[in-house]
Amino acid sequence: MSTKWGRPSLVGMVAVVALLAGACGDDSKNSGEAKTSVGDVAGLPVTHFESGLKPDAPKPQLNVRNATDSEEDKIAIASIADVSEYWTQELPAHFGMPFEPVKELMSYDPSTDTDEACGTSVKEAAMNAFYCPPEDLVAWDRGQLLPMLRTEFGPMAIVTVLGHEFGHAVQYRLGEKAGMSKNVATIVKEQQADCFTGGYFRWMAEEKSKYFRVSTSEGLNQVLASLFFIRDQAGQSSKEKGAHGTAFDRTYAFQLGFEKGAKECAGINQQNIDARITEQPFHKGDKGKGDERLDMKLIGHLQTSLDKAFEGAGAQAPKIVDEGGVCPGGPQTPPASYCPDSNTVSIDLNALSQIGRTGDRKAEFQGEDPGGLGDFAALAEVASRYTMGIQKGVGASLDNDNAGLRTSCLVGAWAAASNRPGANLRLSSGDLDEAIAELLMPKSVIAADVNGKQVENGFERVESLRKGYMEGSTACTQQYG
């Protein structure tokens, strides 16, 4: 976040919260009224099992140049066979046209192979997978990219990347039916491909795949984590050639496809992207390039921002205090805890400062600890505990899954409000990605109840944050009770 180009005063700040009183009740008594059944993922049950290739998966009958017996190639080739089967069903059913298989497939190791694809040596395509329209070719780096994805995120990360590239091949086939032309911006193509990948994973999650099984908890978490990893660098504009989107944008597109299917994906265009895309360059006054030093001065700005944002909620605002991140005789969710007895948010400033350090993207790509997640990841943790005090003040329950999702949603609503004119804190490019990174951490409290019990699947956690950001706080109470 940035305080450098937002005014310290809050004159003109618009409150984000429509009155919560009356919309929030005791979830144990009114759980049947919630429109979302906590414990399902877009209508599918929450499942827990090892995701990946089925033990009895058939051997794909595909001709792949340079294919090896490596586990990465086995997963990649099965992915191509599987997603081809998906589109063989999907294109006739929803687009009225037959599926034509991709003409050429290629696996390569940029450190040893000398092949060319799309007129370029594969040595220049390290850490990459791509679709080449002139050759109707899907290719992938088995030497560096796929092993890293499998090691860091699990096998479904490989399936995600290949599903995405195959989505580009489908765009090429759909043409005008997907709004494709020479003048279509890269971001439109990439958002569509992410969305197509979501539709494919829904099909897989419905147990229609011969090759793979994916759980809606840990398995989809692998997918979301890989989409976070392949996000664009903070500060990039969505107008740039080659823009793919932030992690926030990419997970939105994936979840859209998962929830609504490939036909909805084909309707993604520049107009509806411009209405929601978050990828933007750094503001010219953002001297910290997105991150501020986490100290009590910044916490003071956070307190003011939250107080103003929730002033219409009809609840007494909790105070943020540096008292170790725990509550005496109460909830213990360090580095930030909501203490109901004193209506305070106890923080451990030193621990939050470690989370709030600027991440090292180079280390991240090398599979090393990036060091920190960024200031917004830490501030969102504190904001989540603050919203507990607001929810308590209006009689909402604080100790169940609905409370966790409602909390994350309200954090998203506050984040959107911080973009309003006159705010003392403003979102910087990359801030929402920092929140997603923290949301996917096993001990994050952004989408957790007052005792730190986290909603078990990342799909719902990310979706709830986005819902608040895009639809406001009223949607939080309507959706999560």
Image: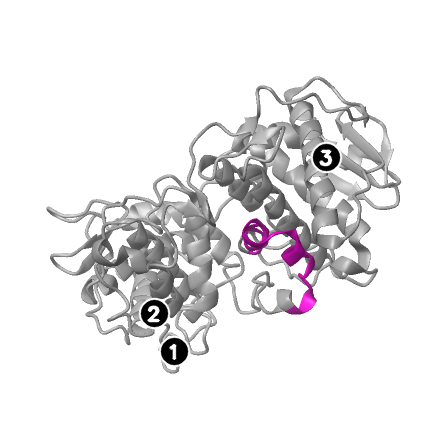
Q: Residues within 10 Å of mark 2 (few under 14, many from 20)?
A: many
Q: Which residue is mark 1?
A: 13
In screen coordinates, is 184 left or right of 371?
A: right
- Quadrant of the rendered image containing residue 187: bottom right
In reply to whether residue 191 is colored magenta, the answer given is no
Where does the image place residue 95, in percent across and percent down from the top left?
74, 54
For the stretch drawn in magenta, what is the main secondary structure? Answer: helix
Distance of mark 3 from mark 1, alpha carbons? Answer: 47 Å
Q: Which residue is mark 3?
A: 126
Q: Amino acid at mark 3?
A: Ala
Which of the numbered marks, if any, corresponds to residue 4? Answer: none
Residue 101 visible from this viewpoint: yes
Where does the image place residue 393, in percent across and percent down from the top left?
19, 66
The magenta span reads 249-271
The answer to whether residue 249 is above or below residue 422 is above
Q: Amino acid at mark 1?
A: Met
